Amino acid sequence: MNRLVIVSNRVANLRKTTQTGGLAVGLADALKQRGGVWFGWSGKIAA
């Protein structure tokens, strides 16, 4: 079994349904079809 692993400096909001295009949408679709994980960082730091 192959798994897709994405590591990025961007975190997509996969719960929104209003997204229509772009790299994040394409990658999210690939994750849904093949399964995998997306590691990302939003840039926020918790204190």
Image (spheres, rainbow, N blue to C red):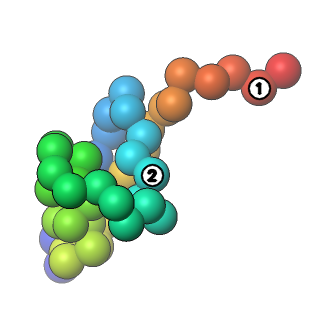
Answer few, some or many: residues within 10 Å of disc 2's Cα (few below 14, many 20 plus, some between 14 and 19).
few
The spot of residue 37 in percent (x, y) is 37, 59
Comparing marks 2 and 1, which lies closer to the viewer? Answer: 2
Amino acid type of disc 2?
Asn
Give the secondary structure at mark 2: loop
Residue 34 is tagged as: none
Q: Nearer the viewer, residue 17 or 32?
A: 17
Question: Is any atom of residue 37 visible in this view?
Answer: no
**Residue indicated by mark 2:** 13
Amino acid type of disc 1?
Ala
Q: Residue at x 77, y 26 (%)?
A: 46
The spot of residue 27 in percent (x, y) is 20, 54
- Farthest right residue? 47
Question: Is any atom of residue 45 visible in this view?
Answer: yes
Along the polypeptide, which appears first: circle 2 or circle 1? 2
Q: Residue at x 20, y 56 (%)?
A: 20
In the picture, residue 18 is in which quadrant? bottom left
Q: Residue at x 37, y 33 (%)?
A: 10
**Residue indicated by mark 1:** 46
- On screen, residue 41 above or below 21: above
Quick check: 15 left or right of 24? Answer: right
Report, in whole angstroms, how far the alpha carbon at label 2 lies from the one at label 1: 19 Å
The spot of residue 1 in percent (x, y) is 18, 78
Q: Quadrant of the C terminus?
A: top right
- On screen, residue 15 above or below 43: below
